[in-house]
DNA sequence: TTGCTCCTCACGTCACGTGAGGTGGC
DNA sequence: TTGCTCCTCACGTCACGTGAGGTGGC
């Protein structure tokens, strides 16, 4: 797939994808000679979608995102090692530990965001409650005639 | 309160506050002669805290935030009109309608964000579940000796 | 008077947007 | 060959960060 299709598929712009490649956040698809078209796989699309979602939802900078991306890259390597028949059980246990550590970190960021969102929502709901109260007072003080 | 204290209190920077004033998002506290110190009230602090929270949590641009701010400004005016003894009951009803419309709009943005966050979380949890599964498989295949 | 905080430019930076001018594949 | 999408500069923009040089209040 070419860069335009990738952008459409993950809901971003061509410029953003090129920029992420520029700052080393995204590998430039496969290696290519200067001026040649960039090509991407469905796997690249998954990866990018993931990054954009983390950035938008968790509100982290591209620098912080780079760390997450490094985690994801490491994850891919570890996954391969895990699958290799030659890998010892002890080593496999450590790989699983590492996977969990990465996931826990992301889950904690999600939890933190959710807590903030919950508080905002409860405040908005409380305000709406007060508006309803006023409305009830108005009804009690001067009921509207039925038509 | 002066700008430094305001910044500390709402968790932002002096520069950001000045910038928001520059683009007309924030009234510059009370009117002042050029070069004089800006002063703010606790009410200004509330307002700014609100704006920053909406921006960070809902991920909206300062342009969109300006609309919300306009809503908030309108709200302050309407609130005063509501309190005025001369305001008719019918008018008060319409003011309450307006308050609710504004709150509903913000609540919907919150709901949308929450849905996205929920999906991200469920995917992370599912991944963690798969890791746990692998771990169980390892234990079954080659149990670790008790020490 | 000394510190601290404030002020106004004004240039720098991050994360892209937006052409300009040119090349590559169905 | 015509369209479309792609390419590489490179300058513009948004939302601030970061000094430079100077003034104001406890």
Image: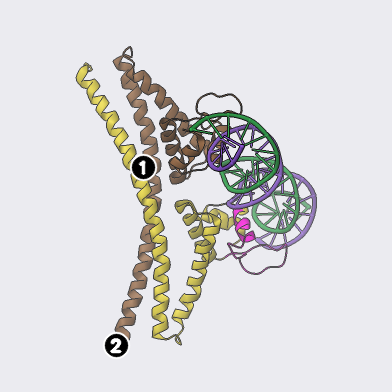
Chain colours: A yellow, B brown, C purple, D green
| Residue A55, x across and y down, in percent | 49, 54
Query: Where is the N terminus of chain A found, in terms of image quarters?
Result: bottom right
Residue D12 image-quadrant placement: top right
B75 over B91 or under it: above or below: below
Identify which residue is drawn at 56% across, 36% down: B18
Chain for mark 1? A
Identify which residue is drawn at 21% across, 18% down: A141
B118 over A126 or under it: above or below: below
Identify which residue is drawn at 47% across, 45% down: B59
| Local SS, label 1 | helix
Viewer-proximal residue among B50 and B109: B50
Viewer-proximal residue among B46 and C19: B46
B91 over A96 or under it: above or below: above
Tag 1 and tag 2 share a subunit: no
Viewer-proximal residue among A11 and B122: B122
Chain for mark 2? B
Residue farthest to the top, as pictured: B86
| Residue B46, x across and y down, in percent | 41, 35
Left or right of A10? Residue A38 is right
What separation in Å lies between label 1 and label 2 (alpha carbons)?
50 Å
- Kindly check if marks 1 and 2 are in contact, taking CB atoms under 8 A apart as contact: no
| Residue A43, x across and y down, in percent | 52, 66
**A17 inside magenta stretch:** yes
Q: Which labelled disc corresponds to residue B141? A: none
Q: Main secondary structure of the magenta part?
A: loop
Q: How many marks on residues?
A: 2
Which residue matches tag 2? Answer: B145
Q: Which residues are magenta?
A: A16-40
Q: Which labelled disc corresponds to residue A120? A: 1
Residue B56 in view in this figure: yes
**A56 inside magenta stretch:** no
| Residue D5, x across and y down, in percent | 64, 54
């Amino acid at each position: 797939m070419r860069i335009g299709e990738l952008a459409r598929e993950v809901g971003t712009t061509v410029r953003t994808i090129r920029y992420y490649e520029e700052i080393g956040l995204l590998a430039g698809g496969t290696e290519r000679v200067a001026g040649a078209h960039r090509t991407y796989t469905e796997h690249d699309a998954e990866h990018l979608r993931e990054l954009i979602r983390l950035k938008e939802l968790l509100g982290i900078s591209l620098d912080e995102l780079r760390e997450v991306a490094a985690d994801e890259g490491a994850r891919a390597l570890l996954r391969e090692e895990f699958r290799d028949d030659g890998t010892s059980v002890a080593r496999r246990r450590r790989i699983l530990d590492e996977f969990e550590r990465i996931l826990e970190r992301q889950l904690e960021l999600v939890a933190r965001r959710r807590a903030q969102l919950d508080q905002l929502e409860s405040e908005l709901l409380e305000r709406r409650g007060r508006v309803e109260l006023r409305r009830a007072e108005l009804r009690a003080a001067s009921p509207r005639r039925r038509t």
